[in-house]
Amino acid sequence: MAVEPEIKAMQHFLDGGSDALHQKARRSWAALRDGAWNASPTVAAPSWVRPLARREHAHCVKMATERTAAAPVPQQIGILPIWTGNNEDSEPGPHWFATHAVVLDGEPLGPWETSPVYDDATIRFERRLAVEVQCWRVAYVVHVATYAPSVELAFRGERFGVIDSELYSVTSAVYLPGNPLPRPTRDVPMWSQLLEPRVDGVEPTLIERLHAHSIISDGDDIAD
């Protein structure tokens, strides 16, 4: 069983890594628990002189409120240490950084850290973790102009939209078998992002799914 400082580090990590994101997530959790959730904390309603925009904003607030769960549910997620090869240069190079993927329902989402990645993660786990959490499904009102068309929104209006998200509260965790793997030395193709496990013992299916999230601009294969 993970010790208490590890639990705190996992909570900080899942909240986004930075102190500001961690504090914001904990405030949101407390508001949900206390029945004071605000689906539009940073997107104010337009003035009365813009009735169409105001109507769209009200629709989004109603939709986001309805899509936010009444209570959290228990869930198991995984934290998988990974190497992220991130190269935004015009030449190939061995640009590999220590990051993580979060495994949800068997699908590795990574890098969990803000992308593109230019350095090793500040909060680092050197072993795989199976984490028991309370998951609270929430929805927020957003400005659609800040989200590219490729980003999936629950609703995309002319000015405002709704995006689904989750808040996690860690309850316990256990380490999974696996030893650290060395930092890769092969070159990452230009304008590409490659993902590789940072520990051994990872199931082949999970590795395949991790590789599927790699982005390769010139079509090169990700194998050594």
Image: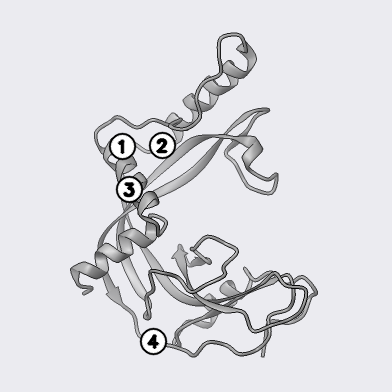
Q: What is the CA distance from the residue labelled 2 to the residue labelled 3? A: 20 Å
Residue that label 2 marks: 68
Q: What is the CA distance from the residue labelled 2 to the residue labelled 1? A: 9 Å
Foreground: disc 2 or disc 1: 1
Indicate the position of residue 155 as horizontal and vertical percent values. 60, 34
Residue that label 3 marks: 23
**Counting residues from the N terminus, which is met first, the one under dot 1 or under dot 4?**
1
Towards the viewer: 48 or 34: 48
Q: What residue type is labelled 2?
A: Thr
Crowding at mark 4 (Cα within 10 Å: few <14, some 14-19, many 20+): some
**Counting residues from the N terminus, which is met first, the one under dot 3 or under dot 1?**
3
Foreground: disc 2 or disc 3: 3
Question: In this rendering, is residue 10 above or below 149?
Answer: below
Question: In this rendering, is residue 141 above or below 17?
Answer: above
Q: SS for tag 1?
A: helix
Crowding at mark 2 (Cα within 10 Å: few <14, some 14-19, many 20+): many
Indicate the position of residue 131 as horizontal and vertical percent values. 32, 66
The residue depicted at 21 percent of the width and 74 percent of the height is: 1
The residue depicted at 31 percent of the width and 59 percent of the height is: 11
Residue that label 1 marks: 32
Q: In which quarter of the image is residue 205?
A: bottom right
Residue that label 4 marks: 178
Q: What residue type is labelled 3?
A: Gln
Q: Do the residues labelled 2 and 1 touch (CB within 8 Å)?
A: yes
